[in-house]
Image (spheres, grey):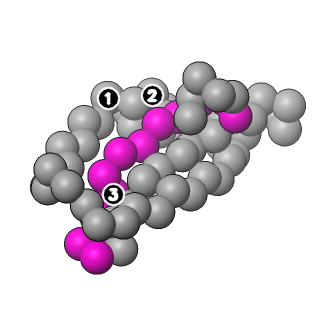
Amino acid sequence: MSKPYILNTLIIYAKKIEITPQKEYYESLQIDEFWTYVGNKSNKVWLLYVYSAENQEVVSYIFGDRSENTV
């Protein structure tokens, strides 16, 4: 299997995962992002996620481009 195939498969399955926050209210949250590419470097895919350091919990995430709509 090729590297692009594996990355694409991971992205497809990750989009199906639903995260339910453990709390209704958080004192503070952190947001971070990173990117990878599928196939070639012009095909960037961004992962943005929200993290609670207090609970060591990923509260939310999204894959997409680096646009206002994704954020």
Q: Quadrant of residue 37?
A: top right
How crowded is the residue under tag 3: few (<14 C-alpha within 10 Å), some, or many (20+)?
A: some
Which residue shows up at 85% across the image and 31% down it?
42
Residue 52 in view = yes
Residue 8 in view = no
Query: Tag 2, which secondary structure?
Result: helix
Mark positioned earlier in the residue sequence (2 or 3): 2
Is 51 on the left-hand or right-hand side of 35? left
Extreme bottom residue here? Answer: 54
List x then y, in percent, for residue 51: 39, 61
Q: From what the image shows, is residue 61 above or below residue 71?
A: below
Label the magenta part by its dominant secondary structure.
strand
Q: Could you give the CA–CA distance between mark 3 and mark 1, rounded to whole angstroms?
A: 15 Å
List x then y, in percent, for residue 18: 25, 36
Dot 3 amino acid type: Val
Disc 2: which residue: 12
Disc 3: which residue: 58
In this view of the protein, which residue sits in the foreground, 62 or 6?
62
Q: Are marks 2 and 1 in contact (CB under 8 Å)?
A: yes
In this view of the protein, which residue sits in the foreground, 50 or 7?
50
Is 21 on the left-hand or right-hand side of 34? left
Q: Quadrant of residue 5?
A: top right
Check if residue 63 falls in the magenta segment.
yes
Dot 2 amino acid type: Ile
Disc 1: which residue: 16
Dot 1 amino acid type: Lys
